[in-house]
Amino acid sequence: MNNLAERKRQLVRDELAEAALQLLAKQGYDETTVDHIVAAAGVSRRTFFRHFQSKEDVLVQFLSDLGTAMCTELSARPATEPPTVALRETLMSFVVEFEEFPEKARALTRIIFGTPALRARHLERQDQWRSGLAAELAQRTGAAADDLRPAITAAAALSALDIALDRWVADGGTGDVRVLVDRALHIAMPDGDSPITQGEPKKN
């Protein structure tokens, strides 16, 4: 019974989040209110506030979920894959949504990068992503706890992703986002040159 209730709660939360993200992308951050979101989702304000503290919280949760998904994806990459290749492929796998829903992805990226409070929360969450990805890289390479290479590699990759997406948004989304992100990641982690490649892939 508890599992069923939790699934229903998660379903409502997911529907609310999607309605909010769609509206924020279409109308803009300042123009979208909680009343707009609950009307689009067909729920009450009370229901909204049971799941989120504010519209900002919707975007922050979106970022948190993205980081969790990245760590899960990296963990699932083949153990024989070179660490930088595994990390690059992990980040590239998230470009698919930018290609499938370019207008929504571009609008949300512009909101997050262009709203000071959200940009700060994004950087805060990105620090958590870095820690998670670095831990996965360390496990793959058998790096010691005091080895800085996994954290530096993860930080470089995430900065490259940010720079590529920022350029894509600034150009009005006219460029090929996959090519842009792939180029940025290869600059940040050139094959054979990144410090993390000095480690060995995890063996099964």
Image (tube, grey):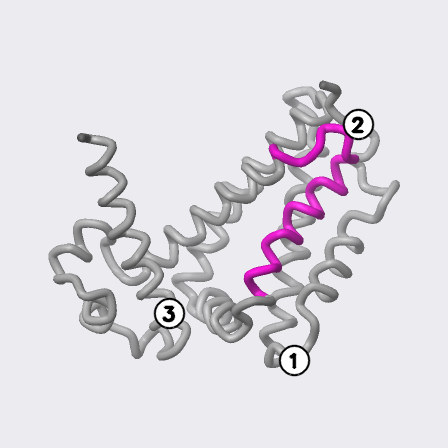
Q: Residue at x 32, y 65 (%)?
A: 20
Give me the C-alpha separation between circle 2 and circle 3: 42 Å
Q: Position of residue 41 (x, y in %)?
A: 24, 65
Task: Indicate the quadrant where residue 10 lies.
Answer: top left
- Region of the chain picked out in magenta, as a range: 75-98
Residue under pointer 1: 174
In front of the other: 80 or 133: 80
Q: Mark 3 falls on what kind of element?
A: helix
Q: Residue at x 69, y 42 (%)?
A: 87
Residue under pointer 3: 22
Amino acid type, label 2: Gly
Q: Is residue 94 magenta?
A: yes
Amino acid type, label 1: Thr
**Mark 2 vs 3, N-terminal side:** 3
Mark 2 and 3 residues: CB-CB less than 8 Å, in contact? no
In front of the other: 95 or 34: 95
Q: Position of residue 30 (x, y in %)?
A: 32, 76
Looking at this view, name the residue that lies furthest to the right: 192
Dot 3: few (<14), some (14–19), or many (≥20) neighbours within 10 Å? some
Residue 147 falls left or right of residue 122: right
Q: Residue at x 41, y 54 (%)?
A: 62
Residue under pointer 2: 199
